[in-house]
Amino acid sequence: VIPPPVIHIESYSDDSITFSLKMTTNIKVSGYVVNIYWTFDSHRQEKRTLVIEGEKSIQKVANLTAHTPYEISAWAKTELGDSPLSFVHVVTSGTRPVSPSLKAKAINQTAVECSWTGPRNVIYGIFYATSFLELYRSPHNSTTSAHNATVLVQRDEQYLFLV
């Protein structure tokens, strides 16, 4: 039986998490697959996937949000097959940024100008869809460090926007 890998949180800050991965077995490990999950504004679950080569590993994941719960899951790729999943939870330190105040204005039938307030030097995600279900499951999205963006949409549809 292949055991799950051990995920150990080495350190965390307001914008990063450092963790180590190891196996408690003599089975040859070729690498790990790691997923980092977080929920954005309780509407959209986000995920970042890392594919890591080698037996032992220390990883730093940066560009995270302060005071946000993250779930890290990992499995090992071994000579005998994939291991079961391991999970660990951690909340980044600091103060979570204030949610931006969004304004969306139709420019014409296929373009919407979105603008918002918020801190500088951060990356914003713009999510939009024609229903709450689509906004949660599979929204259209883009990112920017600006405080505005023009979004192209389909004509004769109503859209929900989230920044």
Image (cartoon, rainbow, N blue to C red):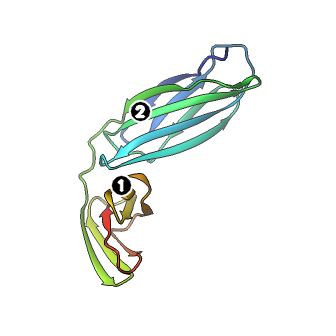
149 vs 98, left or right, is right
Judged from this view, the residue extending furthest toward the bottom is 108
Lateral position of residue 46 relative to residue 51, left or right: left
Question: Residue 163 in the image: x percent, y percent?
Answer: 32, 60
Q: Nearer the viewer, residue 39 or 9?
A: 39
Camera sees residue 122: no
What is the distance, in whole Å, between disc 2 and disc 1 at their CAs? 33 Å
Whether pointer 2 and pointer 1 mark residues with C-beta atoms closer than 8 Å, the reply is no
Residue drawn at (34%, 77%) of the image: 112
- SS assignment at label 1: helix
The quadrant holding residue 69 is: top left
Label 2 vs 1, first from the N-terminus: 2
Q: Can you tell which of label 2 and label 1 is closer to the viewer?
A: 1
Q: Identify which amino acid the numbered label 1 is placed on.
A: Leu
Q: Give coordinates of residue 14: x percent, y percent.
A: 36, 40
- Crowding around mark 2 (Cα neighbors within 10 Å: few <14, some 14 to 19, many 20+) is some
Q: How many marks?
A: 2
- Residue 159 visible, this angle: yes
Q: Which residue in the structure is indicated by mark 1?
A: 133
State the residue in front, 29 or 96.
Answer: 29
Image: 161 above or below 16 = below
Indicate whether 9 appears above or below 125.
Answer: above
The spot of residue 133 in percent (x, y) is 35, 55
Residue ID for mark 2: 12
The quarter of the picture where residue 76 lies is top right
Residue at 51% in and 31% down: 73
Tell me if residue 101 comes above or below residue 35 in the rendering: below
Placement of 26 over or under 134, stated as above or below: above
